[in-house]
Image: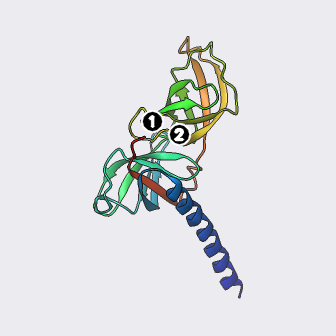
Amino acid sequence: MRTEQSRLRENVSDVRRLKALLDFKERYIGKTVAAQVIGTTGSDQSRAIYIDKGSRAGLRPDMAVITPDGIVGKVKEVFEFSSQVLMISDHDSAAGVILEKSRLQGILHGTGLMELTVSDIMADENVESGEHVITSGGDRIYPKGLPVGTIISALPDHDNAPFMAIRVKPAADLARLEEVLVVVSIAAA
């Protein structure tokens, strides 16, 4: 009975996650493909996941990978039945972003850790901890307005004056991904 109870609890958890994914997909503008995370790889310099959808499902390189909570990364390599996704936290990742409250635009970069940075915002701007960061849509990978994360700190960057060093906590829990959505097409606004 305990084994059955444990299995049922896991099923309830799966149903809740999948319902959130479906609800988000139905509200989302554009076409998406749902995928399961089937593997991860990473070091301090590189972060990637593998998903169970590939060219047979219509996936191509540079498609955005998201969750209802926030962006995850972009498709890097596509195989027939699977794909490799470069995580937004990877050193080689970048995305155009907007600071939601101040409407300042910058470029999001991965640090190799589970943290992000935003560059190209002048040090004399008023940026506060707790401000939300969203996608700008300017990179033509991530649709505009998707959650990216929350600003942890914003200080003058002494190594890159006159800009700020802005640290961001990702909105999506990048360490605990099970299901994702791949944006196959973006509807024209």
Q: Identify the secondary structure beneath mark 2.
A: loop
Is the residue 4 above or below the residue 68 in the image?
below
Where is residue 33, by image quadrant? Answer: bottom left
Q: Relative to residue 140, is residue 89 drawn left or right?
A: right
- Residue at 44%, 61% (x, y): give it: 35
- Which residue appears farthest toward the bottom when viewing the image? 1
10 Å neighbourhood of mark 2: few (<14), some, or many (≥20)?
Answer: some
Cα–Cα gap, marks 1 and 2: 7 Å
Residue 26: image location, x then y, percent: 51, 59
Residue 121: name its quadrant. Answer: top right
Label 1 SS:
loop
Quadrant containing the N terminus is bottom right
To which residue does mark 2 refer? 145
Q: In the rendered image, which residue does mark 1 sit on? A: 137
In the displayed structure, 159 sits above or below 60; it is above
Instruction: Determine contact: label 1, label 2, CB under 8 Å.
Output: yes
Instruction: Pick whichever, 31 or 52, lies toward us.
Output: 31
Please state the horizontal and vertical placement of residue 24, each as a whole percent of the image. Answer: 54, 56
Q: In the shown orientation, is residue 123 left or right of residue 143?
A: right
Residue in the image at 53% along x and 42% along y: 146
Quadrant where the C terminus sits is: top left
Residue 98 shown left or right of residue 48 in the figure: right
Most foreground residue, 164 or 48: 164
Image position of 105 (left or right of 101): left
Residue 78 lies, with reference to residue 36, above or below; the image says above
